[in-house]
Each structure stands twice: as structure tokens, then as C-alpha cells.
Image (cartoon, grey):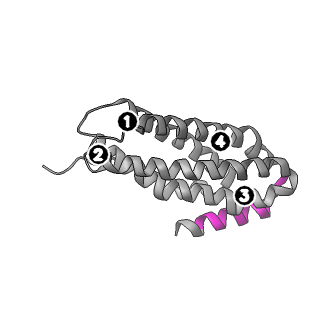
Amino acid sequence: MGAVEAEFGGLGPDLLADPVAFLLAEHGRQRALLGHLERLARRTQGSARPAIARALVAWLACELPLHLRDEADSLLPRMAAAAPALMVRLQAEDLALRALRRKLRDALAPIAAGHAPPKDFAATVLAFAQLYRRRLATEEAEVLPTARRVLDDAACDAIAAEMRQRRS
């Protein structure tokens, strides 16, 4: 019998027609992934742990950086003039988030290989989940409403095209 694999399906490319809605939908998916991560941190045993850990490593290594690039390279520069203080705050937060994401990926590696987690795994998960949930809340309360207010159709079309390009 083969190894158990976990997979967290992505959003359909048709949602990219509205990049702000796509990012908001992705936030919902990311909250679900954070829930899987927190459950993994609470579980000490289980045959599905390596598969879930591998799927979470893939999210942290590929999908989350893609989402963050969508925001950093396409969305935020187009709205920076409308919210300069917010942009500074997000950039500072990005450094901490990037460091925690790397630490978390390293902590997930032994679990993905079928080994016990590092002793600080639960603390790393908690720190990452708290920071990233706070980031999602900021984006939903401040970034995305500002984007809706200041971006015209041409800017949204350009963002959508850039996001599609990253995914092709």
C-alpha cells in the first residue's frame, strides 16, 4: 500500500478576473491551512502527519510566496500613494513573517520525513499563525478595502494579468 498523501486544492484561475476577490478567497483558504498547521502542532502521533506536513511545506515553499508576491509586486505598489503608512507597516512585518516562515518550513521537514517534530515546533507554529492571522486581518480591514477604493479597472486588469503570468 502506498504512502498517504495530503493535498490542499488551490483556487480556480477564473477567480483571477477580480484579483482583489481572488486574494480575499485565498485568505480563507490560508486560514484553513493555518488550522491544519495548528492541529499538526497539537498532535503527537498519527499516520497522516508526514503527508500533512509535506503538503504544508509545499504551501509555505510555493503557494504562500506566490500569494505574497502577488501582493508585494502587483497590488501594494499600485496603492502605495493612497496608504503610505500602511505600506511601511506591512514591509516591516514582512521581514518577521519571512523569517518565521523559513523557521517553520525547517521545523516541518523532520515531520514530513516521518520523524518527531523539533521540541520548539508548537511554539514556532503558534508564532507564525498569530503573526499571519494578524496580517490577514490587516489586509482584509485595510489593504483590500483601500484597493477597491483606489484601483481602477485598468489597474485591476493589469494585476490580474501579472497574477496569471506568475501561475503559468
Label 1 SS:
helix
Percent across and percent down for residue 87 are 78, 52
Q: Which mark is residue 132?
A: none
Percent across and percent down for residue 107 are 40, 47
User: Which residue shows up at 70% across the image and 62% down it?
Assistant: 74
- Measured Cα–Cα span from mark 4 to mark 2: 27 Å
Residue 158 drawn in magenta: yes
Q: Main secondary structure of the magenta part?
A: helix
Range drawn in magenta? 150-164
Q: Residue furthest left?
A: 1
Label 4, residues with CA under 10 Å away: few <14, some 14-19, many ≥20: some
| Residue 131 in view of the camera | yes
- Measured Cα–Cα span from mark 1 to mark 2: 10 Å
Label 2 SS:
helix
Q: Which mark is residue 135?
A: 4
User: Which residue shows up at 79% across the image and 47% down it?
Assistant: 86
Identify residue for label 3. Answer: 75
Percent across and percent down for residue 79 are 81, 56
Q: Residue furthest right?
A: 81
The disc labelled 2 sits on which kind of residue?
Pro
- Measured Cα–Cα span from mark 3 to mark 1: 32 Å
- Measured Cα–Cα span from mark 4 to mark 3: 15 Å
Identify residue for label 1. Answer: 40
> First in sequence: mark 1 or mark 2?
1
Identify residue for label 2. Answer: 50
The mark closer to the camera, 2 or 3, is 2
| Residue 10 in view of the camera | no
The mark closer to the camera, 4 or 3, is 4
The quarter holding residue 47 reads top left
